[in-house]
Image (cartoon, helix red, strand yellow):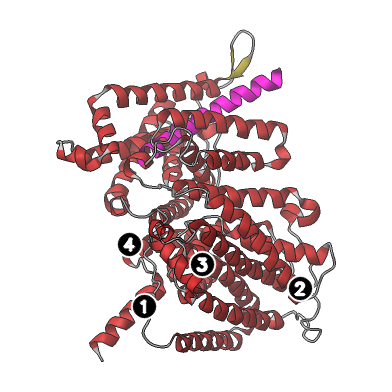
Amino acid sequence: MQVFFSIGVDALAYGMVLFIISIGLSVTMGLMRVVNLAHGAFAMIGGYIASYAARDLGLGYGFAIILAVIGTIVIAIPLERFLYRRIYGAPELTQVLMTIGITFCVIGLANYVFGPTLKTIPLPADLQGPVNLGFRTIAAHKLFAIGCGVAVALGLWFLIERTSFGVKLRASVDNTAMAASLGVRTRIVYAASFALAVGLAAFGGVIGAELLPVEPYYALRYMVTFLVVVSVGGAGSIPGALIACLLLGAIDTTGRYLVPEYGEFFFYLAVIAIVWVFPRGLLGRAK
Amino acid sequence: MSATGISTSAAPAVRTGRPWQRDLIGVAVILLASIGGYVLFPDNLALLTRIIAIMFLVLSLDLVTGYCGVATLGHAALFGAGAYAAGIAAVTFGITEPLSMIAIGAIAGAAAGLVSGVVILRGHGLAQLVLSIAVIHLFHEAANKASAYTGGSDGLSGIAPDPLLGLFAFDLWGRTAYIFGIVLLIAAFVLLRILVRSPFGMLCRGIRQDPVRVSAMGASVKASLIRMYVISGVVAGIGGALNAVSTQVVGLDSLSFTNSAEALVMLVLGGAGSLFGALAGTVVFMWFEHVVSAANPFHWLTIVGALLIAVVLFAPKGLYGTAADLARRFARSNP
């Protein structure tokens, strides 16, 4: 029972961190049809900025998060303007190569600037230590990550389903040309959702730093996981991504607890099985 | 949907001029380059042999990505299967005759090609990429787990191949391995040239350009692609076995995602859809890696990244395709 409970909490926290980072990827992939392998790199940049702000500048955790999100978006805007815009609508292999190239560059530069060591982001006192839930205690930062994941899911749902920006976003996803001819400025919608995606990646990178430690190879190591989440959930679907994250988080965590010597064998086996049965993802829409 | 992309330099199907001439020129170039390598870098023959082994992997990737338009990031599975099969045959079952080891590697590569082809071709686009990534990780974890046979993360060592044909022992300097590799490479190159010009090769190019139309013509797209995958597995398996024979160890890195991704980079750098491009890309990439990563491995990563972005933006046909275009333009302006 104790083991079951701790697997459940870890899986939930891991799944929520995955969700916060990958949901931006899912949105951009559904909207812009860009296979963005550099998404993990943005999460990593966020982690580095937060670590720098909290450790070297001595700012508070909240400030570090805000700085990380804004800083990552500022770094991403010129990339979107000069690199990504050239590969919208290009075939997948082109997009894969370009974004892997960006990832490699980011890894090399991060290592040059920050060194190869692991960077920690010091947690505030409130998030350290365990929280007593009455019948069990769990680590506070995991509870915080779960809360953030729920907040992000609700916030995105509200943004996309209930606001005029969401209406424009959905219209652009469904039919860009038609939306543009009805007066939606799709370029701005694209740029805004790209910024949103990158901001969420940075946010997730900071929140999840305890579970996915920040180091130069972060971008490559977890890139596959984020892609898998989007592919399993179905590009562009928020509930799909949420289900995929919780499911994959559960499979991965259970595998690590119960049969650690197999590594990620069962994770990838499950991925193949799910994608085999649902080639468009669990909740993906037919093209 | 399976149009991959990077515009390939696959030449138009009907070529004026005699293709055999180009084959002969290609073989001559490979021969000259290998003699040059032997004379100029006698101390680096191990590296040159490794380049040849990787050439098999990139050629094999070219068959499915360049000619058939399948985007995959898991092609090292085929290479690693060949390497491990040859290594296990030598260490566990005592089959140390080099040509049999190569044959075993080719068979294992074909089997791995069949498995990964069936899995990867199930999806399109993003799903295809993710399936290919999952396949390479699955192979990697399986090899890591089966440490009784594969040596796990320590790698498989103690491969001691017999003298080649009973005459030429594998020496410390790697001369025998190098010459063996060159001979295998030339044989594979000629056979692959014949393959890509054959009706089957043409069919695969047709699939890359328009799978719907090919199936409307009555050809089975999936069966053709899987056949190509098996052939590609044979080529990659030979490369893996050659690597096992020449280095006498097999490491988990031969089954890694990085190896797959690097093979793709080499292919695109040289020019997908052309056998010459695959060879040129491998040589350029590996040589630069050798020079630059000796200085600083992370600068190497930055340079590869910048190189990839530059190739996508400025030379989507790769080095060979761009050079061929320039040569053609030059020839036209100076008749």
Q: Callout 4, which amino acid?
A: Leu
Q: Earlier in the sequence, mark 3 or mark 4?
A: 3
Using the numbered discs, state the Cα–Cα distance from disc 3 to disc 2 in whole angstroms: 24 Å
Q: Residue at x 39, y 75 (%)?
A: B13
User: Is A43 in front, or is B109?
Assistant: B109
Q: Callout 1, which amino acid?
A: Ala
- Give the number of the mark in front: 4 or 2: 2
Task: Note whether residue A202 is visible.
Answer: no
Q: Earlier in the sequence, mark 3 or mark 2?
A: 3
The quadrant where residue B172 appears: bottom right
> Measured from the top left, where is residue B328 in percent x and y?
31, 82
Q: Which residue is mark 3?
A: B63
Using the numbered discs, state the Cα–Cα distance from disc 4 to disc 2 in whole angstroms: 45 Å
Q: Callout 3, which amino acid?
A: Leu
Q: Which residue is mark 1?
A: B323
Task: Look at the image and give the residue range highlighted in magenta.
Answer: A1-28
Write down the chain letter for disc 2: B
Bin the neighbour count of mark 1 within 10 Å (Cα to Cα): few under 14, some 14-19, many 20 and up: some
Q: Secondary structure at mark 3?
A: helix
Q: Earlier in the sequence, mark 1 or mark 4?
A: 4
Bin the neighbour count of mark 2 within 10 Å (Cα to Cα): few under 14, some 14-19, many 20 and up: some
Where is A268 relative to A129, above or below?
below
> Measured from the top left, where is residue A161 in percent x and y?
31, 24
Q: Locate the C terminus of chain A by quadrant.
A: top left
Using the numbered discs, state the Cα–Cα distance from disc 1 to disc 4 in whole angstroms: 16 Å
Q: Callout 2, which amino acid?
A: Ser
Q: Earlier in the sequence, mark 1 or mark 2?
A: 2
Report if residue A153 lies within the magenta region. no
Where is B244 relative to A85, above or below?
below
User: Is A110 in front, or is A17?
Assistant: A17
Bin the neighbour count of mark 4 within 10 Å (Cα to Cα): few under 14, some 14-19, many 20 and up: some
Q: Secondary structure at mark 4?
A: helix
